[in-house]
Image: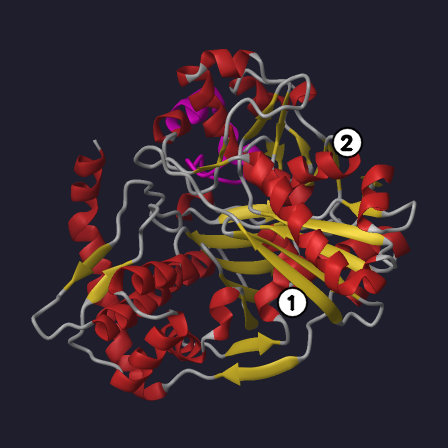
Amino acid sequence: MYLGIDIGTSGVKAVLVDDDQMIVAHATTSLDVSRPKSLWSEQDPEDWWRAVCEAVSLLKRDNGGFLCKVRGIGLSGQMHGATVLDKHDKPLRPAILWNDGRSEAECAELEALAADSRTITGNLAMPGFTAPKLLWLKNNEPDVFSRINKVLLPKDYVRLRLTGDYVSEMSDAAGTLWLNVALRDWSEEMLSACALGIDHMPRLVEGSEASGTLRPELASEWGMAATVIVAGGAGDNAAGAAGVGTVVPGRAFLSLGTSGVYFVANEKYSPNPEQAVHAFCHCLPDTWHQMSVILSAASCLSWITKISGATDEAALLAEVEAAGPDNDGPLFLPYLSGERTPHNNPCAMGVFFGMTHETNRAALCRAVLEGVAFAFADGQDALLSADAHIDSVSVIGGGARSPLWGRILASVLERPLVYHRDGDVGPAFGAARLGRLAVTGEIPKDICTAPTIENVVEPDGTLKDMYGERRARFCRLYTALEQEFMEKAA
């Protein structure tokens, strides 16, 4: 039995997976995000730990007979979050999250300080990454910065609480801008540009390797064996890839979580920072991947459900389904937290365009679903321009539960979309697979296979022309408003 724990932005998911790779139990607990100022996004690291303990307690309450058989634990987590600890391992401040946009000026500063940054890291300096956040702390909270002993990513803070060890792994570390992605090791040049050193960093392992063992007192409290291996694990996207079998070249997936990710597995390291495409290490040895990222995806659906007064997301989606498509309906720019690929613009904002007296909440929600799809299409174009090879595309994340959204996405992207069993818990399932590999030493590609296919959503040819026209207007709208976004942020 293996336990996968995914530390997300809106909650923690924990799954128990048996030796036949079947999910036998799962639990979810919620998390809140603090936004004390414009562009800021923070969480208290203690909340991650509380949520993990609550999730495991739920599993113990309802499935203690399975939990006691756990041999390995894998961790997945939201990427990029800057968790700064003092010499007593206490957080010095709330963690600055992946969708925080305050450090735009520090991105330019970092690239000026490290002239080879794009060559070393394979990526543009973006406010979402970890390194610019540390420069922001240095510039704006020097007292906090002077007391930093370790910088950890969210899942690696949880690992510290699990094992007592400072460890990270390649896929998550690649998103800090401190990793030499080709060499899979920390870059002293990039760390020095942030006035940090190797001693501030955790040691590195591969995602499928052991990183430590569960502390005995926790094993006893949770009803587990005396020795439980904790794997290196992965950033949430690489863990999702391990869960859905996106570990060989040509396979890709869309993740419809709080953010949206278009992830493509590569046979080699393939950077293309000019298109704001991420080139990161995969969570398995000697593998890499590319990603396009939009900062708001399923979170847009949650937002429109809340502000429109709908009963819940399912009820609102049913209204959209009943209303049908409308070429003259409003358009939506889904940039509620700024945007990464391809615009790299933390100042971009959400916009509805084209509303009339006849516009109702079903029309607004359809605009939201289409707007996210158009943003994914922008990312797909960026990936293809970066020489990505895409054979098949799977769908994971909470948004994968909506057949309507799947039809819209397939039609906009003009690609069939593959839906797998348990796709909505992909990262946690992938983490459990990594926990297994750390225990058994099996060949990773033999374990990280594609789960059972539940259905395939084909593009709707009757919508091709309509979506082509609407996406063209969507792109023109962003261009027309780009300067307005910058001036409002200023």
Please state which amino acid type lies under the numbered disc 1.
Val
Q: How many marks?
A: 2
Q: Farthest right residue? A: 226
Residue 141 falls left or right of residue 18: left
- Amino acid beneath label 2: Asp
Counting other residues with Cα less than 10 Å from the Cα at mark 1, is it few (<14), some (14-19), or many (20 or more)?
Answer: many
The residue sitting at the front extreme is 61
Secondary structure at numbered mark 2: loop
Badge 2 density bin: few <14, some 14–19, many ≥20, Cα 10 Å? some
**Looking at the image, residue 338 lies above or below residue 107:** below
Q: Which mark is residue 117?
A: none
- In the image, 180 versus 450, the foreground residue is 450
- Quadrant placement of the C terminus: top left
Residue beneath disc 1: 244
User: Could you tell me if the residues under marks 2 and 1 are in contact, i.e. CB atoms within 8 Å?
Assistant: no
Give the left or right position of residue 285, taking residue 266 as reference: right
**Circle 2 sits on which residue?**
165
Tell me the CA gap for discs 2 and 1: 29 Å
Q: Quadrant of the rendered structure where residue 240 is?
A: bottom right
Residue 190 x, y percent position in the rendering: 56, 25
The quadrant of the rendering that contains the N terminus is bottom right
Q: Position of residue 233 (x, y in %)?
A: 71, 48
Q: Is residue 122 magenta?
A: yes
In the displayed structure, does residue 47 sit left or right of residue 124? right
Please give left or right for residue 129 compared with residue 446 in the image.
left
In the rendered image, is residue 99 in sight? yes
Nearest to N terminus: mark 2 or mark 1: 2
Q: How is the image coloured?
A: secondary structure
State the extent of the magenta-drawn residues as a range: 108-129
Answer yes or no: is residue 241 visible: no
The residue located at (85%, 41%) in the rendering is 213
Give the x, y percent position of residue 214: 82, 41
